[in-house]
Image (spheres, helix red, strand yellow):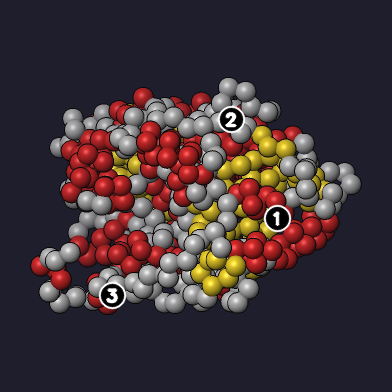
């Protein structure tokens, strides 16, 4: 495409960068091989599946969907899903939202951007929520907020710990302020669960941003993260546009948050189940939660 | 009135700021600074004062009045220190059984390297969680622009009020237009779709009360707020702490709630 701006001198590094065309990946049938976005090397899909969808060459964690995560962390055949039927409707009559919801349902094979339920991890009962990136980037609307709240309320009344996987672009703007209110609602449910002396464990995955970072993602008693996951309140693009500077390498990645003291540990997929299991054992209390205590 | 006109009014430079409201609503105000962790955020004013004869904790976002003070106040966009300072004051209010008034006026929490490094998301999340269980009455008033999470971090209250020409939105109309239609000039349309005016939000039950405005003279606004705040605090102070926190929890629980829930 030719336009005047092509000949304009770039004002800063940021503008100049957009001129450089990205290299396209070689065309390989995606069902056989996948190229790693990090090291660009090819791996067999079967190898990736056997390796928790982690690049065997460089350790890059591929994005995976919520059901795949559940299979990795929960004991086989123990997951019982709750409120699968809940789906969103366009209450504000936001233009184009109905079509987006329809596409997201077809694309993700899910009704909404989070799956909740209970399951066993090494034979220990836990309440779980796992967010789904392929459903409108895991954005939080009323149904996502409601499901998260429901699982915390369920866990509180059944004295269960909560394990949550987050991946989200933030609050869903097509639901306006009703989406923003979900941040307060979920935080309230987390607080009540916490005040009942129960454990809440979060695992932040790539990417966790916006209203989800500024609510339940950062409210865990223990916050774990996957290697190199982007974890931010404002995404890097927004910051670059606000301050008109390039951001340092590795900014807002899990390792950066660890250094700044905002995550407890970085846990690669291969040892996630083992780590969660050990943490659950360390929090086992035969009385089932301290009703008077708070953290 | 068109939604975008409200946006322009809410952002108008001559509009009274947090400090004006403090001066006109409270007497003997003493500003208290600092979050005791990193620094003091000038975009957030916190302190104590009297609402008539009632000692209250005041938390106000301040965007500044002229270029110099706007730069000092970072145009009303707080860093994490601002939210942590606010929470520190709220905890003190709980200790000394003082009601809390929050005045919201920000285009959003600041997006910058320092803010991210010091945990902007974490600071907001912590406020949401802690405000939900504070055992003293909290009333929040959106006086100008209520920008997303940065506004909500002072908005978990027993009641949320809005001035007639204030706006409260999940994202700025410009941001929404850029993301959805890749065209910032469509922000007028976005403002309409986002349902960000006081009237829209009253209908959606996001706000409990609209304070009518007369742009040239805010005296009536101040008078109405003063009496309204005083009466509401009397009402909420009569509740026992469990009733108060239950009321606040249910206030937010209702958004998007399904009929049958498990408790």
Q: Are marks 1 and 3 in contact (CB under 8 Å)?
A: no
Return the chain for callout 2: A
Q: Mark 3 — residue?
A: A20
Q: Position of residue B180 (x, y in %)?
A: 30, 47
Left or right? Give the position of B147 relative to A227: left
Q: Residue at x 35, y 42 (%)?
A: B169
Q: Residue at x 56, y 31 (%)?
A: A86
Q: Mark 2 — residue?
A: A85
B227 over A28 or under it: above or below: above
Comparing A205 with A257, the one in front is: A205
Q: Position of residue A108 (x, y in %)?
A: 51, 44
Taking the image as drawn, is residue B32 in sight? Answer: no
Circle 2: is it few (<14), some (14-19), or many (20+) Cα within 10 Å?
few
Taking the image as drawn, is residue A115 in sight? Answer: yes
Q: Residue furthest top?
A: B259
Q: Residue at x 64, y 63 (%)?
A: A46
Q: Mark 1 — residue?
A: A72
């Amino acid at each position: 495409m030719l336009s005047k701006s092509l000949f304009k001198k770039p004002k800063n590094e940021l503008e100049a960068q957009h001129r450089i065309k990205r290299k396209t990946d070689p065309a390989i049938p995606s069902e056989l091989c996948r190229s790693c976005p990090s090291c660009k090397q090819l791996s067999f899909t079967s190898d990736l599946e056997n390796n928790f969808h982690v690049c065997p060459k460089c350790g890059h964690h591929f994005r995976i969907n919520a059901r795949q995560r559940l299979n990795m962390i929960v004991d086989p055949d123990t997951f019982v899903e709750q409120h699968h039927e809940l789906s969103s409707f366009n209450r504000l009559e936001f233009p184009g939202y109905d079509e987006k919801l329809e596409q997201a349902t077809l694309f993700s094979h899910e009704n909404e951007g989070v799956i909740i339920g209970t399951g066993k991890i090494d034979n220990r009962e836990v309440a779980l929520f796992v967010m789904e990136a392929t459903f409108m980037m895991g954005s939080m609307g009323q149904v996502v907020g409601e499901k998260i709240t429901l699982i915390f309320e369920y866990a509180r009344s059944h004295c269960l710990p909560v394990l949550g996987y987050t991946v989200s672009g933030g609050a869903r703007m097509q639901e306006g302020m009703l989406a923003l209110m979900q941040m307060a609602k979920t935080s309230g449910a987390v607080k009540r669960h916490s005040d009942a002396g129960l454990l809440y464990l979060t695992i932040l995955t790539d990417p966790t941003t916006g209203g989800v970072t500024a609510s339940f993602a950062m409210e865990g008693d223990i916050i774990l993260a996957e290697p190199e996951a982007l974890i931010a309140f404002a995404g890097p693009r927004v910051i670059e546009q606000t301050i008109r500077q390039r951001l340092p390498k590795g900014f807002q990645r899990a390792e950066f948050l660890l250094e700044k003291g905002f995550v407890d540990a970085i846990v690669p997929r291969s040892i996630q189940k083992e780590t969660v299991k050990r943490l659950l054992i360390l929090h086992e209390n035969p009385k089932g939660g301290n009703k008077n205590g708070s953290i | 009135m068109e939604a975008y006109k409200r946006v322009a009014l809410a952002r108008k430079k001559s509009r009274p700021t947090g400090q004006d409201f403090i001066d006109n609503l409270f007497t003997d105000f003493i500003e208290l600074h600092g979050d005791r962790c990193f620094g003091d955020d000038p975009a957030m004013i916190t302190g104590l004062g009297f609402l008539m004869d009632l000692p209250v904790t005041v938390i106000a976002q301040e965007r500044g009045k002229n270029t110099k003070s706007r730069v000092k106040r970072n145009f009303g966009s707080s860093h994490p220190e601002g939210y942590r300072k606010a929470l520190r004051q709220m905890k003190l209010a709980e200790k000394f059984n003082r009601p809390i008034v929050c005045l919201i006026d920000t285009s959003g929490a600041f997006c910058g390297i320092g803010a991210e490094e010091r945990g902007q998301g974490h600071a907001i999340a912590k406020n949401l969680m802690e405000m939900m269980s504070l055992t003293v009455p909290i009333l929040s008033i959106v006086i100008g622009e209520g920008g997303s999470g940065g506004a909500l971090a002072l908005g978990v209250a027993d009641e949320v009020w809005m001035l007639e020409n204030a706006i409260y939105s999940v994202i700025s109309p410009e941001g929404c237009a850029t993301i959805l239609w890749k065209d910032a000039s469509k922000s007028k349309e976005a403002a309409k779709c986002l349902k960000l005016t006081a009237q829209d939000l009253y209908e959606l039950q996001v706000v409990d009360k609209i304070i009518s405005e007369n742009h040239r003279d805010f005296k009536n606004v101040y008078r109405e707020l003063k009496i309204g705040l005083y009466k509401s605090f009397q009402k909420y102070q009569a509740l026992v702490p469990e009733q108060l926190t239950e009321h606040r929890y249910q206030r937010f629980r209702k958004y998007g709630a399904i009929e049958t829930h498990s408790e």
